[in-house]
Amino acid sequence: MNKSKSIIFVVSFLCVGIQFLSAQININVDVKKPGSPVQKTMYGIFFEDINYGADGGLYAEKVKNRSFEFPQSLLGWTTFGKVEVLTEGAPFPNNPHYVRLSYPGHDEKRTGMDNEGFFGVTVDKDAEYRFSVWSRVPTEASSIRVEIIDESSNIIASQKLTIDSKDWKKYQVMIKSSKTVNKGRLRIFLTSKNAVDLEHVSLFPVDTWKGRENGLRKDLAQALYDLHPGVFRFPGGCIVEGTGIEDRYQWKNTVGQLENRKTNENRWEFTFPYRFFPDYRQSYGLGFFEFFQLSEDIGAEPLPVLNCGMACQYQNWDKETAHVKVCDLDTYVQGALDLIEFANGDTTTEWGKVRAQMGHPAPFNLKMMAVGNEQWGSFYPQRLEPFVKAIRAKYPNFKVIGSAGPSPDGKDFDYGWQEMKRLKTDLVDEHYYKDPQWFLNNAARYDKYDRKGPKVFAGEYACHPKNRKNNFEAALCEAAFMTGFERNADVVHMCTYAPLFAHVDGWQWRPDLIWFDNQRSVRSANYYVQQLYGMHVGTHVLKTVADKLPLTGKDGIYASSVIDKSKNEIYLKIANTSDVVKNVTYTLAGLKAGERKGTLTVLKSDNPDAENTIENPTAVVPVTTDLKISGNTLNVELAPKTFSLYVIKL
Ligand code: AHR
């Protein structure tokens, strides 16, 4: 044997040895002594109108700029013939523009307009759509024809509408499409010599989530439901703050009559790396009432986030003049109190009445709110303090959530936490968008957290691989990291991955949990991690150790376990982030002899960059098989790069 060969031999012997030594892991799970309770709110959803998440996304409206309130009134519309934008005698004071279609001056000519929709007006063959419009005639009865046209201007659906009232009235007609069209348009023709005024032009699929008229896209809402979320945070994100304070999210503008909700700029309108045209605004058709309703539909606790008197700090940095003076915060603070009344107040109260008029006399049972999104520095606690005082004074049991800023550590983070402790907020919202290694290194992050202070709300987090895709590597690192949430359920009470949605034709931030185009949607590998946690929250933590230590990354293994006392099941979660097979023996201390049934669900891929896409939505999906367990020992073989969930029926 020559020297080089002997080196290879020794090295490979060592590798086999190391692999062999690290391959057997004995994990003890203490089933007989359940530990801290796990909050029902533990795993939830963060919603923000970024990446066309609301208008053009979850909100099923197909018409862009339906109220003609974009700064350029006709943006999204193409007009022909005689079309004017007017304001006189407008029916909805908060949205004062409407259009008048008039005779083009010759019988052989035409007047009308068409709408480009959000990346096209997309319709399905044989599906029904509800066209509605507020309209009046200035003189005599008139008529319009409504069409949906395909990419080549062929008519694929058409309906007539007679407008006979001089007073504003809502008209509607059902339209059925003869063809599936992705990038179609909605076209309206004046078909009479008499003029007609149009306002709030709308086209909705009839088949929305729960069949609601002002409804949500069914596949996207279903994807939220399927996450089994414990909490639903809305409306964001930086959108709460606005580019300038005047563009901040104001919940009162988003409730009440749909047509009169004052539209707004979107904080994300000017932030696309490849799309500079400012046509991404907020219609508020999906407003606070709809958010509460959606929370209820998907079984999640509502968690509104309110502006604290600060504009987005990323866009204004340390310019105090960008924010509201502390002495001028009264209406902001009152807004927070009014929101609690809107959600919970009885129907005789000012805001409870608004809720009831909108169709929900029963309270929404709101228990918490965040004040401020991702704020840092001294301006924030100065402004948060009056909110905390006022809310505590009126609603002593209501939970207030404060922010620790945009980073998971550092000077601002430490200062933020210190101030939240001083103000005694119930929870502190932490945000982290970090690389895979950070997630792997930080699984023990909460093991040493102060147990006496506020609880943790990991309100925005996502693993960002180099290419910032929703790849398997990121999902696996999140799964491994989340064992740290679970193990520390006494201090971590809620967590929400962010952002939630992204339209493939209009996104400015990735990765995101769910991608979609106008017809299809895809659940990312990261989605499945969230879903596996969301479906197996458990009620209590079970102490899970190897050599008396929690499994926080030694040999690439991360593990945690919970019991669900009401279902009489235990859930063992374990990630093998290493490149080798691991043999694991679980000892389930306290389990009596006998045979038990269970399941094993594995999320895996041989390719760290594997990604679910619209074209290939099942590249990384969990696979479940049945399991039989005898006695209290479970021997398992963990393939490299896998996240496994064992469900055992007790
Ligand atoms: O999730 C995207 C953005 O990230 C949020 O709007 C903001 O809070 C954070 O900076």
Image (tube, helix red, strand yellow):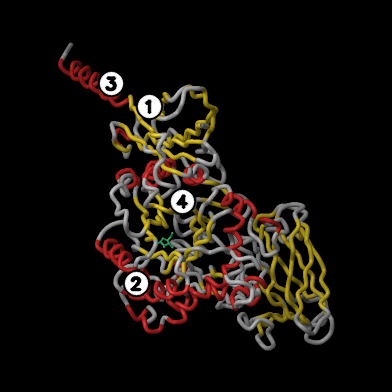
Q: In this view, does 90 lie above or below 549?
A: below
Give the x, y percent position of residue 150: 71, 58
Is 224 situated left or right of 12 in this image?
A: right
* Residue type indicated by callout 3: Val
Sequence order check, earlier mark of 2 and 1: 2
Q: How crowded is mark 3: few (under 14 residues within 10 Å), some or many (20 or more)?
A: few
Give the x, y percent position of residue 393: 43, 74
What's the distance in space between the residues labelled 1 and 3, CA to CA? 18 Å
- Residue of label 3: 16
Is 295 situated left or right of 458 in this image?
A: right
What's the distance in space between the residues labelled 2 and 1, CA to CA? 48 Å
Give the x, y percent position of residue 480: 38, 41
Residue 205 vs residue 412, the one in the foreground: 412
- Residue of label 1: 584
Residue 637 vs residue 336, the one in the foreground: 336
Is 498 situated left or right of 351 in this image?
A: left
What's the distance in space between the residues labelled 2 and 3, CA to CA? 56 Å
Label 2 element class: helix
Q: Residues within 10 Å of mark 2 (few under 14, many from 20)?
A: many
The residue positioned farthest toward the left in the image shown:
3
Q: Does residue 402 appear in the picture of this structure?
A: yes
What's the distance in space between the residues labelled 4 and 3, CA to CA? 43 Å
User: For disc 3, does the CB lie below 8 Å from ligand 1?
Assistant: no
Residue 346 vs residue 137, the one in the foreground: 346
Sequence order check, earlier mark of 4 and 3: 3
| Among the 4 quarters of the image, the one containing residue 607 | top left
**Label annotation for residue 39:** 4
What's the distance in space between the residues labelled 1 and 4, CA to CA? 29 Å
Q: Is residue 221 above or below residue 559?
A: below
Sequence order check, earlier mark of 2 and 3: 3
